[in-house]
Amino acid sequence: MEWIKYELKTTTSACDAIGGLLEELGVIGYEIRDNVPLSPADEKKMFTDIPATLPPDNGEAVIVFYGDMPETSSQTVFSTGSSLRDADLMSNDTGHSLLSEPEKFIQRFLERIENQNTLSAIPRPEITYTIEDDSAWKDKWKENFKPFWVADDILIKPTWENVPEDCNPSDIIVSIDPGSAFGTGTHETTKLCLLSLRKYINERTRLLDAGCGSGILAITALLCGADSAFCLDIDSLAVEGSIENARINGIAPERFTAIQANILEDADTIRKQTGEPFDVAVANILADVIIPLSEKIGDFMKPGGIFISSGILAEKADDVETALTANHFQILDKNILGDWVAFIAKKPQH
């Protein structure tokens, strides 16, 4: 399917005003790309193990939005430097129809800028637009997700790749389609969790995965011999994806459960569904989530149970360790890979 992709170059200070003008013309959603650091409140909303590392803010921003393709088009790249056809704009043109007619949309938008500037100045932005074919890019990311070894005998591979010829029959092959969920296993934090899980699970292990993403941690644990896994994620698509990935890997449904829930907010409700306490709990999220989680996760674990936490940047490791010990966990191990830290902690026997 083809779309019209608009890119509007402006300044960060003008984004709010320009966004308002775009909405008046029928743009119901747009993306702002800039180097403005996230606020603490925004960082808390990011349930991902990827840090927000940005170059210095230079005051520049790009606003990206899309429109439907007209029925015919022969050009592929356009800009505000193009000659403007159909200059007579009908006053009853809607924003949605204008988005399908780029040069009309640009002229109408620039007129709005000029009118606005009689009240308060907005820098005149540079607008370009291109024809995008989503069939050419929607699977582009897959080129960078290739089979890789987590351990000598554990291979993570995407579902669309064949098993490498050098695999042995005894090797554990984990097939994952991450979809829109995080958790392909390539990131250091996921590797730290997988290696720790391998050390602490056995055939009787009941596992709790708080923030399961693609389900890679729980699925690998089950393929390595764990008895069962109960997975949670705040994203419904992650839950659906993890269930499908479990099916792809031949995990029996009675061994794998995944539900949409927030353990920080729904602990009592979740506990009613989990049954008896867990032997091992794992959370590959963020330090700022693991810190409050350390106060609640012990209620889901057996005495002497193991809590594996990762997604922790090195500079926040001390804060996580303080939270774990304050909640009566004994730190058994602190593993480091690159800029990331994982803790293996034990719940007291009494």
Image (tube, grey):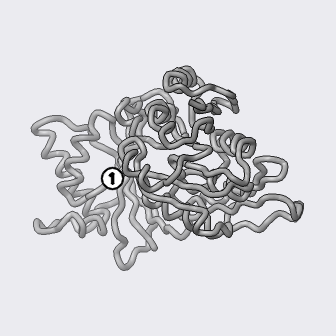
**Vertical position of residue 139 compared to residue 285: above or below:** below
The residue that appears at 54% across and 55% down in the rendered structure is 230
Q: 213 or 294, which is in the foreground?
A: 294
Q: 342 or 337, which is in the foreground?
A: 342
Q: Classify residue 227 by image quadrant.
A: bottom right
Please provide percent x and percent y for residue 266.
Answer: 37, 47
Please provide percent x and percent y for residue 333.
Answer: 69, 28
- The residue sitting at the front extreme is 350
Please state if 244 lies on the left or on the right of 64 as rendered.
Answer: right
Q: Can residue 79 be seen in this view?
A: no
**Vertical position of residue 32 compared to residue 181: above or below:** above
* Residue type at the position of mark 1: Tyr
**Vertical position of residue 89 compared to residue 119: above or below:** below
Q: What element carries label 1?
A: loop
**Vertical position of residue 323 compared to residue 137: above or below:** above
Q: 319 or 146, which is in the foreground?
A: 319
Please state if 296 lies on the left or on the right of 83 as rendered.
Answer: right
The residue that appears at 50% across and 43% down in the rendered structure is 300
Please provide percent x and percent y for residue 95.
Answer: 21, 63
Please provide percent x and percent y for residue 1.
Answer: 46, 74
Dot 1, crowdedness within 10 Å: few (<14), some or many (≥20)?
some
- The residue sitting at the bottom extreme is 71
The residue labelled by disc 1 is 30
- Count every numbered label the image shows and give the total: 1
Query: Looking at the figure, which quarter contains the C terminus?
Result: top right
Q: 143 or 115, which is in the foreground?
A: 143
Q: Classify residue 73 by image quadrant.
A: bottom left
The residue that appears at 65% across and 33% down in the rendered structure is 344
Q: Can residue 280 be seen in this view?
A: yes
